[in-house]
Amino acid sequence: MRNFINRFAKDESGATAIEYGLIAALISVVIIGALVAIGPKVKGMFDKVETELNTVPE
């Protein structure tokens, strides 16, 4: 039993998967934050284009 516990404590094969998962989560949070930050600016640009297109004489 002691041998099993020692092998289990030294096994780090799952640690890499957890680290990759944490990195992916961090990247996702950064992307979402960036999209939230630039969202109003993009909406403003589309609103301006829509206004300009609606004011063009036919």
Image (spheres, helix red, strand yellow):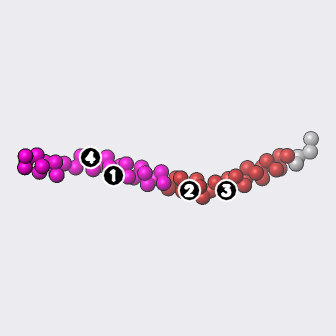
* Secondary structure of the residue carrying numbered label 3: helix
Q: Which residue is mark 1?
A: 19
Residue pictured at 32% horizontal, 49% vertical? 18
Query: Label 4 to label 1, Cα distance in Å?
Result: 9 Å
x then y, percent, for residue 29: 48, 54
Q: Which residue is mark 2?
A: 34
Query: Label 1 to label 3, Cα distance in Å?
Result: 33 Å
**Dot 4 or dot 1, earlier in sequence:** 4
**Dot 1 or dot 3, earlier in sequence:** 1
Q: Residue furthest left?
A: 2
Magenta residues span 1-29
Q: Are marks 1 and 3 in contact (CB under 8 Å)?
A: no
Say which amino acid is labelled 3: Pro
- In-image side of 28 versus 42 (left or right): left
* Secondary structure of the residue carrying numbered label 4: helix
Query: Label 3 to label 2, Cα distance in Å?
Result: 11 Å
Predominant secondary structure, magenta span: helix
Residue 40's disc is 3
Counting labels gives 4
Q: Which residue is mark 4?
A: 14
Q: Residue furthest top?
A: 58
Query: Residue 18 magenta-drawn?
Result: yes
Say which amino acid is labelled 2: Ala
Query: Label 3 to label 4, Cα distance in Å?
Result: 41 Å
Residue pictured at 56% horizontal, 56% vertical? 34
